[in-house]
Amino acid sequence: MKSEFFFPRSKLSIISRCLASLLLPCALLSSAVSAGETDPTVNEFADLLVGVFDSSAQAIDDSSYLDVTVQHCPVTVTDLPQDKNSGRFLVVRQSVSTSSRPYRLRLLRIFAGPSKGTVLTSSFAAKDNFDFSDLCFKPESERLVSFSQFTEEKCTTFAQSLNGIFVGGTPVEGCPNSRSGAVRMTSELKLSTQGMTTWDRGYNAAGQLVWGPESGPYQFERVSEQDVRLAQLASFFSGRFSNEEQVALDPKNFTPVSYEYCQIDVAQNPLRPKTRLMLARQTITTPTRTIQRNRIYEFFRSNEGHISIRTNPFDESKVPDDICQRPLNERRSLPNEILSKKDSCVLKFNWDEASESFAGGTPPEGCPSNFQGSVKFVLSEVIKDGVISPWEKWLNAQDEIVAGSKLGPYIYKRIKP
């Protein structure tokens, strides 16, 4: 993935002169006067930031990216010094979506930049272990802090409005940083009504990347609600899997099987993100033939609170064969009629914190089936990140196994790209 960020050299020169070492106020480099909350660009930028964003769609697609939640909320700041008495103030709360504790918590001041259509953002950390991690969960009238509770970080970012999209980041030389052996960090931002992308990276004294993604920015979508366990379960499935290791150990009792799972969606899904859809392509290799079995897995939360998967047959003529190799936006624009709930089976799972896995399967009575003379299908399954262990059995009217493993579950491991 390539970066979407680009600054004309002339703009970078202005930014660098304006922000280098933060020794000179930007007003000295421009005749523009900071207008604070009356500046339309400041208000537009701040309003676009307010809300909740997550990177769950990207994390499902690519396990090298975490599912991260970023929340910005407006706050009132008292005891402001004269040179900070303008602009908009927001709190940013950033966390791994499955964690209740943020790993980044800052007060932001957004104010007018050196020229029309630009904004600057300064970041402030808390003093003396002041904990404001729950501030965004309070009513706005109760979000009140004193500026004396914060200390300014030595970094300010720049953004410019380009046809309703803000593009910006740190100055060219970056900002001081000491995380994981870094001496400086760079940040790039793209913000719109749909969401934002951010690319933060830390470099050591030799110019080597020591933290942050190598391949491209984090991609955040604006969300109205979240079901983080549902997204996590979908991410555990994503990718290509094989039971090659198991077959090598016991070729007599286990048949070579591979899976490919990829995230999809229909173009008009009113339940997004309450549901997640995955395409599952199964390939079974026997001595005489290769069998292909395709399903759509629909992840949802049952009325009882279980994380559930409905396995659906679908109209394969409406899904391109190479759909899993296509960009995410194409995979999430499939025709609505592909999803059929006829003859579907619903599996229910619970999250186990100790083993960091999901465990579940079919209801006790199983699901109806006529495969190879069976009357029902029974599944028990454990799902971890990168390992799927289903024990599938097809039973006849006498509860005898007519298909499936008699020895234990198949073990599929994710194949590294």
Image: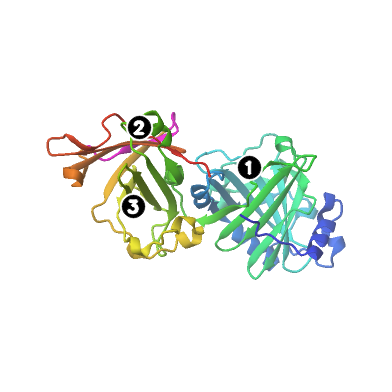
Q: Outermost residue toward the front?
A: 288
Residue 162 lies, in percent from the top left, at 67, 68
The type of residue carrying mark 3 is Arg
* Secondary structure at numbered mark 2: loop
User: What scheme was used to colour the molecule?
Assistant: rainbow
Q: What is the spatial separation of the Cα atoms under label 2 and label 3, in whole angstroms?
A: 26 Å
Q: Which residue is labeled 1 in the image?
A: 104
Mark closer to the observer (3, 1): 3
Identified by mark 1, the residue type is Arg
- The mark that comes first in sequence, 3 or 1, is 1
| Label 3: few (<14), some (14–19) or many (≥20) C-alpha neighbours in 10 Å | many
- Residue that mark 3 sits on: 295
The residue under the point 34% across, 52% down is 294
Q: Position of residue 387 (x, y in %)?
A: 43, 36
- Asked if marks 3 and 1 touch (Cβ < 8 Å), the reply is no
What kind of residue is marked 2?
Pro
Magenta residues (range) = 353-364
Compared with residue 217, is residue 29 higher up or lower down, i.e. above or below? below
Q: Quadrant of the N terminus?
A: bottom right
Pinpoint residue 389: horizontal percent, then vertical percent: 37, 35
Q: Nearer the viewer, residue 109 or 76?
A: 109
Residue 359 magenta: yes
